[in-house]
Amino acid sequence: MFTPVQPTLLAIGIDGLPKSSSAIDVYTASTVREVMSTMRLIGFDLVVVGLDDPHLDVWEALHRVLTAWPQQRWMLASSQVTQEEEILARSLGATVVLDEAPDELWLVEFASSLRRRDPVTGFSPLASTFDSPVVLQANWRTVEA
């Protein structure tokens, strides 16, 4: 019998996102260090980025995430998005740019649809190692950590 696994999201710099429930797991990070630590521990279906936290450089956090996990799917959701930020987000591979935080039902359906389309279902986060090669399971190439 198939038991569906609920989608897992990481929220970075966004207010108004629903909390974890029986339908979705939502983790939050408020610093670049928290983002990277959380990403190393958990494989996320979707990273939801917002521009609501003035103390967090979301672009730096996103740059680090995409450098370490280039196949990570992410979206930008903020009412403060400028045209330049939208262009930047799309050029960095945002799956979607929204002008408000989505509700729980939309997030569950969207993240689930990403999971169904994902050719690599066994994606796992990178190990936290130094001076040893790490195999990225998402794109099957060896990189130096």
Image (spheres, rainbow, N blue to C red):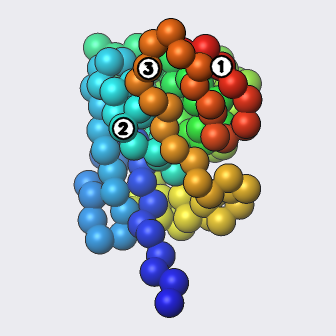
Q: Identify the residue under disc 2.
A: 41
Q: Amino acid at mark 1?
A: Val
Say which residue appears at 33% left-offset and 51% top-offset: 26
Label placed on residue 129 = 3
Name the N-terminal-most of marks 2 and 1: 2
106 in relation to 26, above or below: below
Q: Is residue 94 visible?
A: no
The percent position of residue 18, horizontal first and vertical second, equals: 31, 55
Horizontally, residue 128 falls left or right of residue 89, namely: left
9 in relation to 30, above or below: below
Q: CA distance from mark 1 to mark 3?
A: 12 Å
Q: Nearer the viewer, residue 86 or 28?
A: 28
For the residue carrying disc 1, how many other residues have a C-alpha within 10 Å: few (<14), some (14-19), or many (20+)? few
Q: CA distance from mark 2 to mark 1?
A: 19 Å
For the residue carrying disc 3, how many other residues have a C-alpha within 10 Å: few (<14), some (14-19), or many (20+)? few
Q: Secondary structure at mark 2?
A: helix
Q: Nearer the viewer, residue 133 or 78?
A: 133
Name the N-terminal-most of marks 3 and 2: 2
For the residue carrying disc 2, how many other residues have a C-alpha within 10 Å: few (<14), some (14-19), or many (20+)? few
Q: Residue furthest top?
A: 131
Q: Identify the residue under disc 1.
A: 143
The percent position of residue 68, horizontal first and vertical second, equals: 56, 23
Q: Secondary structure at mark 1?
A: strand
Q: Residue furthest bottom?
A: 1
The percent position of residue 45, horizontal first and vertical second, equals: 52, 51
Q: Amino acid at mark 3?
A: Thr
Q: Amino acid at mark 2?
A: Leu
Q: CA distance from mark 3 to mark 2?
A: 13 Å
Q: Nearer the viewer, residue 120 or 13?
A: 120
53 in relation to 102, above or below: above
Say which residue appears at 62% left-offset and 57% top-offset: 121
Q: On the image, which quarter does residue 91 sit in?
A: top right
